[in-house]
Image (cartoon, grey):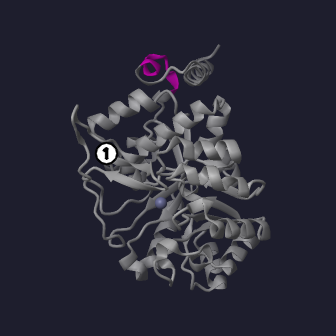
Amino acid sequence: MTQPQTSVLRRAWTRRDLMRLGIGGALASLLPNLAVNGQAVAADSPKDAARQTLATEEDRNFFRRELDSFLPDKIFDAHAHLFKQGTVSWDLKGLPPQVGYPEYQALIQDIHPNRRTAALFLPAFSPDKKELLPQCNEWISQQVAQSKDCVGGFFVKPEDDPEWVRQEVKRLKLRGFKCYHTMAAVTPTWETQIPDYLPEQLVKVAGEEGWSITLHMVRSRAVADEGNQRWIDRYCRQYPNMTLILAHSARGFQPAHNLEGLHNLKGLDNLYFDTSANCEPIAHQAIMRIIGHKKMLYGSDFHVSHLRGRSVAVADSFLWLYEDTPVWKEKQGTIKPVMIGLENLRSLKWACWSERLSDNAVEDIFWNNATKLFGIS
Ligand SMILES: [Zn+2]
């Protein structure tokens, strides 16, 4: 048996062991894991970018203990934001003022080290810099051009002329849209209906061109909301060549909404889900069980991945704990929160374990589903 075959078998056995025997955490990390020594990413990262890291000792220990034996060798990150200097007003301690393809490849090593990583890149910008959107879209295009296995989305505003959008997306060699509720003309935008920030004429263009749309739903009950269900169902049925990706595991930060609402969205072949930023295992499990794992795409939500804390389901809603939320001093001692991207991955691991997913199914979520969808070999 050749060395590569041994590696694959051993790694496969390691993760199967987690699934079947319920061995996790520290014990699993002691098991042989030869396939994690690859240097696939470093090869095309400039030297200065390759040194960038925000990971603390707690983050690295968490990865070793919880994730190293679970994560496949190849990762497609279907929800990653890149940003050009001057287009964002927020500031994350330690993050460079601009993150393009090389910086992303270096920094994402904090979340999944030593894995080949490809991505669907989406523009990031601050709401007060809306006028810089054309620059953001150009920037994404330039970053996508640096890799043959990455794709990019074009940020659309509801008032954009559909034909102009079609030409721009083609010119920039992108293959989908990103929309966001803050662009809607109604207030409060958190309660807005989908067409207010994703008008049907843009969905029609995506359908005609075979593009994807990443949708971060709003309204308090997310996919359990009748209005959201109605529009998702209509868009998917009306435009079967468009792929609708519901971000953050259907924004099921409160998993009860997924358990209640997903039954009404069964059978839509062009409906997908990215798992980004959601730290609740049942949110992912609900999709696996009700819709099927073939529709799931892993996503890091970089740069949100690099904040510390997690989402927490509570009452009929959810909240976010961040590093500066004053909750970490407990009686038993002070808790050091880890990166949201790591918490998200552990919740996905628990979901895979609980649903008894095979190794192949795990690899589908992390690579095969996305590369098939985006036509990447
Ligand atoms: Zn995002």
Going by the image, does 332 lie left or right of 18?
left
Name the spot of residue 285 as percent of width and height, x first.
60, 41
SS at mark 1 in the image = loop
The residue depicted at 61 percent of the width and 79 percent of the height is 165
Q: Residue at x 31, y 45 (%)?
A: 53
**How far from the left and from the top, in percent, is residue 278?**
48, 50
Type of amino acid at the residue the image marks with label 1: Thr
Q: What is the quadrant of the N terminus in the image?
A: top right
Please name the residue shown 70% across and 69% down the image.
Answer: 230
Q: Which residues are magenta?
A: 27-35
Q: Is residue 282 left or right of residue 25?
A: right
Q: Nearer the viewer, residue 163 or 263?
A: 263
Q: Nearer the viewer, residue 210 or 50?
A: 210
Residue 279: x and y, percent?
46, 45
The residue indicated by pointer 1 is 53
Magenta segment, principal secondary structure? helix
Can you see residue 250? Answer: yes
Q: Position of residue 186 (x, y in %)?
A: 50, 83
Tell me where residue 223 sits by quadrant: bottom right
> Taking 54 as reference, is 365 left or right?
right
At horizontal 30% and vertical 66% (from top left) the residue drawn is 90
- Image height check: is 150 above or below 108? below
**Mark 1 nearby-residue class (10 Å; few <14, some 14–19, many ≥20):** some
On whether ligand 1 comes within 8 Å of the CB at mark 1, the answer is no
Q: Is residue 264 left or right of residue 17?
A: right
Q: Is residue 48 above or below residue 270?
A: above
| Residue 359, magenta (yes or no) | no
Q: In terms of depth relative to the viewer, which is nearer, 74 or 14?
A: 14
